[in-house]
């Protein structure tokens, strides 16, 4: 019996080539989209699954505010004190590990490489986390200063097949060599902690007195708890503990515990690896479902539309003894066969597309992921659901036929079936219009983000590292670099405007010392404003003398100069003009005078509103910004490289552009935008394929009518319009449904941004007109061929 | 074998009510070959559909092989049909996607016969119908006469007690039509009961008895042998 079902299913597929191709193509596109999205989601959901202690590790989040200030700062930063104090005071904390990531230049023999994945961690690292050491003792590999563990890939890169343990590496400007004490397996692609080099935290040489303060919070602290349930009671204990710790200090510090397993998808705070917003997972899952529904609806539509053709077969089968159940399973069997063919194709296409998809999403998903039990289960479930969903309605329609009517030829397709088909077409196009609008709006917001005037100029600015060795010669380096006409200015600073600054507090000289305000601040030199294009609206830029004033060795004579943004001036109660010349303190340890005020600029991502910001004088810095003339980019870079080799011998020549850094702030949005573009296009193609199939069927059904109309004098345009109007009408209904839904959904999405684009009518008009043109074009393919056919032929064939 | 008493069938649409069978009574004995004749719309096809358990009467009794089947549900009707009744249609009603062999095999599949036995039975009946050489052809590759022979083969492959033929020669030329009638006669001679609806006096003469119908009732009966 089953063999017979398969046989007839296969022959039907071959006989109805166009319909079968549409069904298989549609389902293949739908399934491929689902697989790609499922792999992406699985990858995201599998973050840190390898971590055996993931349910009892917590990350410490710090929030601080100063008495009298409504502003508070919250983020993934803690001082070195937190780990030791928490471990000592709370029995729930079994172990704690401090970590920090810096870029470091590694030198080994003739190799000189700037390593971006370089971390420092306490010796407890391997007792807290499950990274697998291939050689070395987990208890001692990081127990002393200048010890380092490297990954298997890093070992291969530097030492080939030789055993690296015991060998020494030169790290950055540190005068001590780091001894390799262990080799660790490469960090999994789905780990929020990924490093190539892991040095002992003690190598940082942080002075002992930093153990006494909760300030100087520049590190990440993870706690290993006694159990998952220990987190909530510990959180309460920490709250009361910190109340005591901060009593009378003029500031409040709260520490919150974030479950490790929730960080990647749910945390609003940065991690070592970029987080993903869980809402994007839901959006993508929704898109996958919508695409699959479109593909299924095409199948159902063509299936029910073709039911007339299959009715005779069903009638015969019924007459010679087939039961309803047998017929039902026969049609489900056909659906399963089509689904299996589509599945095989979609698995192959998914594997072929994975490298491109990875490039698009910035992920490292391997074809082996297709073999994971989750994906296999997903494939089985999805095929079963699609086969049942897509196959059962046509099957039920068919087995409901009365054989007598069918065989007598008096059978007519029901109005109910037509109503359903029309509803499904409307639904398909509603989804398409929704996806077009969503994609257009996401692209518009991304364009807005990329091109918004931020208050500084991020174009043609190179960002380069600046280390201790370079700082010794900074004046010479700047002078040499600027000798080339293509180089406009060179600035040494803490961070570029894209990266913002560090957390500080400030007060004016008339405010009492216990009344502080949280502020973001950045140490810079005299060329920072010029290099970044910040707009000075009052006062003056820093001078070389201002920088010298800040670098006097005698702390009593040190005088700082500040440039505030408008928000910082307003927070201190000044207008821009008033602020110039006023005395103020940054962190109390930096007394000084306001030199100028710059226009507010976005130093954080556009998700956040602009807050107070202070630039303060300090020589050196950690980064060098180089403003280039846009017309001499390449020659300037070549010149810089030549100079670099002469002036900076301790690190390779590496640079990045500031606008690239800026785009990095929106990596998840950019990824979403790219992925949405891809899948919205696929959804529209699928809907058009469905429409193509339905219009083909519709035209076939009306061949005789078209012939009669032509004989009676109907023109080409008249016939095309006549055939297209039903589909155009359905598309209009789809548009009416999709418009309010998409307006509501996208309005909600834009609320994530403090700065956002408008939802203008033009975008909706483009989506609606685009859909109508697509529908008209798709339907016209059949309509035109029917309209130009010889009516004699169609009438005779009838 | 068949006894129907006061059988009524009325077709209703929103505005029109058509009486297809009007208190019709008749009896067919096992081994008989009965022809049913009458003008279009007299109810003969309706009668054949009810006899073939493809349709159910509104009123009256229908006893088949001693069992009252008039109000059997769909499942029981299908079961009764597949074990006892074979159909031959004017338009052959073969499944285009199946070969000759597979078309004939289909009733055996639905009655759950094993593959080896199916093969044997199908080959035997194809041989008998002299269509064995076309076993792997599709219906559209055959002439009308050949297609009807396949349809007859399919109708008899399950050894039904009753064959219902609805104008079996209506789509055939006279030579092929005669061949089909001879096949039916042979089957009847081997013991199969046959009820045939026809417009053709020539074909009707192959039967033992002709029932003439008008307005849903029998008007005359001619016994030919």
Image (cartoon, grey):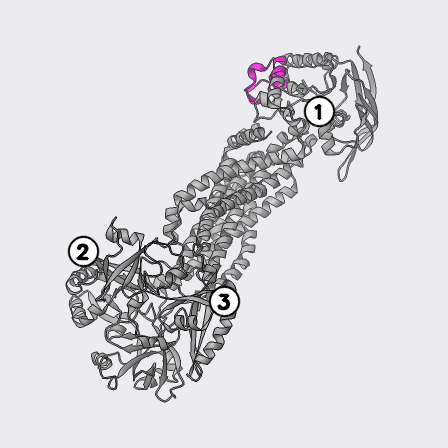
Residue at 69 percent across and 33 percent down: it is A402
Question: Earlier along the polypeptide chain: callout 3 or callout 2?
Answer: 2
Residue A231, numbered label: 3
Residue in front for this viewpoint, A280 or B2: A280
Give the percent coordinates (x, y) of residue A330: 60, 34
Q: Main secondary structure of the magenta part?
A: helix
Chain letter of mark 2 equals: A
Label 1 sits on a secondary structure element that is: helix
Do residues under tags 3 and 2 come within 8 Å of each other at their CB atoms?
no
Please state the horizontal and vertical placement of residue A590, each as a whole percent of the image: 30, 82
Alpha carbon separation for disc pair 1 and 3: 72 Å
Residue A95 seen: yes
Q: Quadrant of the N terminus of chain A?
A: top right
Residue denoted by label 2: A110
In the image, what residue occupies the spot 24% across and 71% down?
Answer: A492
User: For the magenta stretch, what is the residue range?
Assistant: B122-148
Calculate the distance from the C-alpha at mark 3 to the C-alpha at mark 2.
49 Å
């Amino acid at each position: 019996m089953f063999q017979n079902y398969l046989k007839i299913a296969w022959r039907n597929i071959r006989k109805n080539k166009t319909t079968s191709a549409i069904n298989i193509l549609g389902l293949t596109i739908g399934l491929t989209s689902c697989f790609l999205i499922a792999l992406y989601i699985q990858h995201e959901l599998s973050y840190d699954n390898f971590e055996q202690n993931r349910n009892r590790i917590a990350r410490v989040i710090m929030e601080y505010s100063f008495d009298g200030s409504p502003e508070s700062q919250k983020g993934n930063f803690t001082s070195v004190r937190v780990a030791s104090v928490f471990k000592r005071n709370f029995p729930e904390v079994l172990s704690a590990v401090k970590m920090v990531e810096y870029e470091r230049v590694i030198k080994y023999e003739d190799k000189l490489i700037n390593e971006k994945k370089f971390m420092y961690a306490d010796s407890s690292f391997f007792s807290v986390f499950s990274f697998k050491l291939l050689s070395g003792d987990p208890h001692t590999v990081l127990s002393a200063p200048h010890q380092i563990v490297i990954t298997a890939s890093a070992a291969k890169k530097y030492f080939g097949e030789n055993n690296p343990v015991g060998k020494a590496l030169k790290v950055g400007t540190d005068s001590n060599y780091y001894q390799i004490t262990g080799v660790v397996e490469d960090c999994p692609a789905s780990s929020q902690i990924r490093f190539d080099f892991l040095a002992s935290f003690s190598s940082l040489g942080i002075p002992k007195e930093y153990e006494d303060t909760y300030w100087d919070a520049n590190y990440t602290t993870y706690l290993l708890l006694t159990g998952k349930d220990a987190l909530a009671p510990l959180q309460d204990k920490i709250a009361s503990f910190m109340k005591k710790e901060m009593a009378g200090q003029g500031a409040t510090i709260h520490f919150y515990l974030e479950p490790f397993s929730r960080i990647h998808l749910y945390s609003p705070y940065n991690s070592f690896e970029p987080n993903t917003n869980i809402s994007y997972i839901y959006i993508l899952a929704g898109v996958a479902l919508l695409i699959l529904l479109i593909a299924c609806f095409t199948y159902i539509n063509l299936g029910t539309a073709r039911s007339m053709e299959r009715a005779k077969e069903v009638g015969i089968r019924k007459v010679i003894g087939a039961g309803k159940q047998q017929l039902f399973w026969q049609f489900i069997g056909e659906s399963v066969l089509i689904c299996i063919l589509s599945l095989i194709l979609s698995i192959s296409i998914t594997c072929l597309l994975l490298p491109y998809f990875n490039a698009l999403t910035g992920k490292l998903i391997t074809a082996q992921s297709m073999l994971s039990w989750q994906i296999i289960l997903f494939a089985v479930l999805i095929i079963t659901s699609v086969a049942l969903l897509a196959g059962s309605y046509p099957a039920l329609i068919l087995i409901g036929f009365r054989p007598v009517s069918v065989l007598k030829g008096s059978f007519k397709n029901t109005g109910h079936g037509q109503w359903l088909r029309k509803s499904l077409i409307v639904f398909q196009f509603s989804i398409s219009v929704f996806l077009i609008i969503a994609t257009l709006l996401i692209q518009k917001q991304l364009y807005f983000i990329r091109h918004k005037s931020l208050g500084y100029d991020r174009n043609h600015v190179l960002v380069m590292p600046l280390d201790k060795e370079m700082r010794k010669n900074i004046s010479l380096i700047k002078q040499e670099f600027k000798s080339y006409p293509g180089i406009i200015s060179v600035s040494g600073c803490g961070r570029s405007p894209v990266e913002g600054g560090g957390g500080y507090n400030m007060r004016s000289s008339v405010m009492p010392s216990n009344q502080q305000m949280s502020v973001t601040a950045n140490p810079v030199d005299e060329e920072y404003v010029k290099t970044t294009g910040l707009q000075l609206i009052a006062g003056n830029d820093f001078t070389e003398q201002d920088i010298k004033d800040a670098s006097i060795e005698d702390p009593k004579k040190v005088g700082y100069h500040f440039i505030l943004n408008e928000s910082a001036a307003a927070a201190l109660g000044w207008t821009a003009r008033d602020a110039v010349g006023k005395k103020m303190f940054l962190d109390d340890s930096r007394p000084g005078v306001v030199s100028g005020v710059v226009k507010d600029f976005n130093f954080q991502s556009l998700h956040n509103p602009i807050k107070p910001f202070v630039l303060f004088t300090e020589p050196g810095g950690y980064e060098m910004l180089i403003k280039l003339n846009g017309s001499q980019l390449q020659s300037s870079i070549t010149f810089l490289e030549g100079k670099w080799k002469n002036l900076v011998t301790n690190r390779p020549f590496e640079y990045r552009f500031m606008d690239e850094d800026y785009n990095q702030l929106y990596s998840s949005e950019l990824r979403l935008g790219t992925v949405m573009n891809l899948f919205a296009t696929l959804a529209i193609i699928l809907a058009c394929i469905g429409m193509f199939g339905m219009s083909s069927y519709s035209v076939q059904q009306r061949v005789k009518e078209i012939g009669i109309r032509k004989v009676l004098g109907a023109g080409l345009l008249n016939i095309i319009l006549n055939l297209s109007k039903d589909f155009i009408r359905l598309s209009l209904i789809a548009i009416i449904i999709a418009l309010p839904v998409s307006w509501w959904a996208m309005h909600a999405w834009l609320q994530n941004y403090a700065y956002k684009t408008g939802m203008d009518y033009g975008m909706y008009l483009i989506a609606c007109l685009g859909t109508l043109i697509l529908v008209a074009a798709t339907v016209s393919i059949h309509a035109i061929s029917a309209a130009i056919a010889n009516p004699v032929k169609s009438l005779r064939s009838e | 074998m068949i006894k129907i008493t006061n059988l009524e069938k009325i077709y209703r649409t929103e505005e029109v009510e058509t009486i297809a069978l009007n208190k019709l009574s008749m009896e067919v004995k096992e081994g008989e070959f009965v022809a049913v004749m009458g003008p279009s719309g007299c109810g003969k096809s309706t009668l054949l559909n009810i006899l073939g358990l493809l349709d159910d009467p509104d009123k009256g009794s229908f006893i088949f092989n001693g069992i009252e089947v008039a109000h059997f549900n769909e499942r029981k009707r299908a079961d009764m049909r597949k074990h006892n009744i074979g159909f031959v249609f004017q338009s052959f009603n073969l499944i285009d996607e199946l070969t000759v062999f597979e078309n004939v095999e289909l009733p055996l599949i639905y009655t759950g016969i094993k593959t080896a036995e199916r093969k044997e039975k199908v080959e035997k009946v194809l041989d008998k119908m002299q269509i064995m050489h076309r076993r792997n052809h599709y219906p559209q590759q055959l002439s009308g006469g050949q297609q009807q022979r396949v349809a007859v083969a399919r109708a008899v492959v399950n050894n039904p007690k009753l064959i219902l033929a609805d104008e079996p020669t209506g789509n055939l030329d006279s030579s092929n039509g005669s061949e089909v009638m001879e096949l039916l006669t042979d089957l009847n001679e081997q013991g199969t009961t046959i009820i045939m609806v026809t417009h053709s006096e020539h074909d009707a003469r192959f039967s033992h008895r002709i029932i003439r119908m008008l307005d849903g009732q029998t008007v005359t009966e001619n016994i030919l042998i």
